[in-house]
């Protein structure tokens, strides 16, 4: 089982965004998203939502900062 994240365009952290992905595995019932700072590897965001969609909506209160680069994991 794995998720293949589609390209994420730069976005304003204060307005949030969404991550779409392809999924190979059993039926989706929850999606967990972990976002780490690219330079340090420190965890910047970790959240789980109950959904069957191949999409994770990053909330406006995620704690992400404009101008930084991050790595996303689904």
Image (spheres, rainbow, N blue to C red):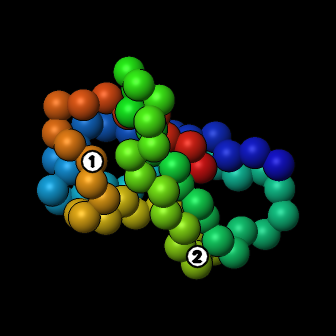
Q: Is residue 21 visible?
A: no
In the rendered image, residue 70, in percent from the top left (x then y), is placed at 38, 33
Q: Which residue is mark 1?
A: 64
- Camera-side residue: 30 or 65? 65
Q: Is residue 41 positioned above or below 74 on the image?
A: above
Question: Mark 1 near mark 2, Cβ–Cβ under 8 Å?
Answer: no
Identity of the residue drawn at 84% across and 64% down: 26
In the rendered image, residue 35, in percent from the top left (x then y), is placed at 45, 44
Q: Is residue 15 positioned above or below 70 on the image?
A: below
Identity of the residue drawn at 58% across and 60% down: 32
- Camera-side residue: 24 or 59? 59
Furthest toward the bottom, the residue is 50
What is the spatial separation of the Cα atoms under label 1 and label 2, in whole angstroms?
A: 22 Å
Q: Which residue is mark 2?
A: 51
Left or right of 4 on screen, residue 13: left
Question: How busy is the neighbourhood of tag 1: few (under 14 within 10 Å), some, or many (20 plus)?
Answer: many
């Amino acid at each position: 089982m794995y998720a293949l994240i589609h390209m994420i365009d730069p976005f304003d952290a204060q307005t949030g965004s969404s991550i779409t992905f392809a999924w190979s595995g059993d039926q989706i019932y929850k999606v967990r998203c972990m976002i780490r700072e690219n330079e340090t590897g420190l965890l910047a965001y970790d959240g789980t939502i109950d959904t069957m969609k191949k999409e994770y909506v990053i909330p406006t209160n995620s704690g992400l900062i404009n101008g930084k680069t991050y790595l996303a994991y689904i």
